[in-house]
Amino acid sequence: MNEQQAIKFPCTACGKCCRKVGFSPQTQFLDRGDSVCRHFNEKTNLCNIYEDRPIVCRIEDYYTTYLSSQIGWIDFIEINQEICKKL
């Protein structure tokens, strides 16, 4: 079992990242015009297309596809937790 399988990304579904998609070049295409993701349900803090969301929204898949050869999983989690705090 690798680190990624043993330790899941600690998302709390707070919705902060979904409310700031307009600030990142990787997620701007999701912006409904006010930096909030067009698929974000503000009443539930959940994604309306969760099962079909883009790879940039699938943390584990994005990491495996684009970043796993550059940074360790634990370091990736720590960096993202710091970003979450700043949001």
Image (spheres, rainbow, N blue to C red):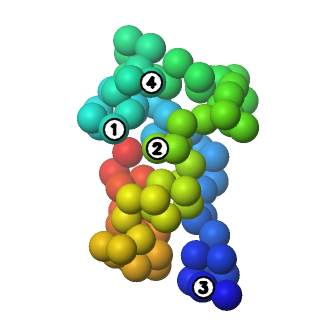
Left or right: where 14 falls relative to 46: left
The residue drawn where x is 40% and y is 79% is: 72
Give whichever of discs 3 and 2 has the lower sequence position. Answer: 3
The residue drawn where x is 53% and y is 18% is: 38
Give whichever of discs 3 and 1 has the lower sequence position. Answer: 3
Give whichever of discs 4 and 2 has the lower sequence position. Answer: 4
Q: Given the current orientation, which residue lies at the most extreme bottom position?
A: 1
- Whether residues under marks 1 and 2 lie with C-beta atoms below 8 angstroms apart, the answer is yes
Q: Is residue 64 at least partly visible in the picture?
A: yes
Dot 1 corresponds to which residue? 26
The residue drawn where x is 59% and y is 44% is: 14
Density class for disc 3 (Cα within 10 Å; few <14, some 14-19, many ≥20) is few
Position of 58 relative to 50 (above/below): below
Instruction: Residue 49: give x, y in percent of width and height.
Output: 68, 28
Q: Quadrant of residue 34?
A: top left
Q: CA distance from mark 3 to mark 1?
A: 27 Å
Report helix, strand or loop for mark 3. loop
Q: CA distance from mark 4 to mark 2?
A: 10 Å
Dot 4 corresponds to which residue? 30
Query: Considering the image in quadrants, where does the N terminus appear?
Result: bottom right
Density class for disc 4 (Cα within 10 Å; few <14, some 14-19, many ≥20) is some
Please tell me how many numbered marks the rendered image carries: 4
Q: Is residue 16 at least partly visible in the picture?
A: no
Instruction: Residue 4: give x, y in percent of width and height.
Output: 58, 76
Density class for disc 1 (Cα within 10 Å; few <14, some 14-19, many ≥20) is few
Report helix, strand or loop for mark 2. helix
- Whether residues under marks 4 and 3 lie with C-beta atoms below 8 angstroms apart, the answer is no
Amino acid on which the number 2 mark rests in the picture: Val
Dot 3 corresponds to which residue? 2
Dot 2 corresponds to which residue? 56
The residue drawn where x is 46% and y is 44% is: 56
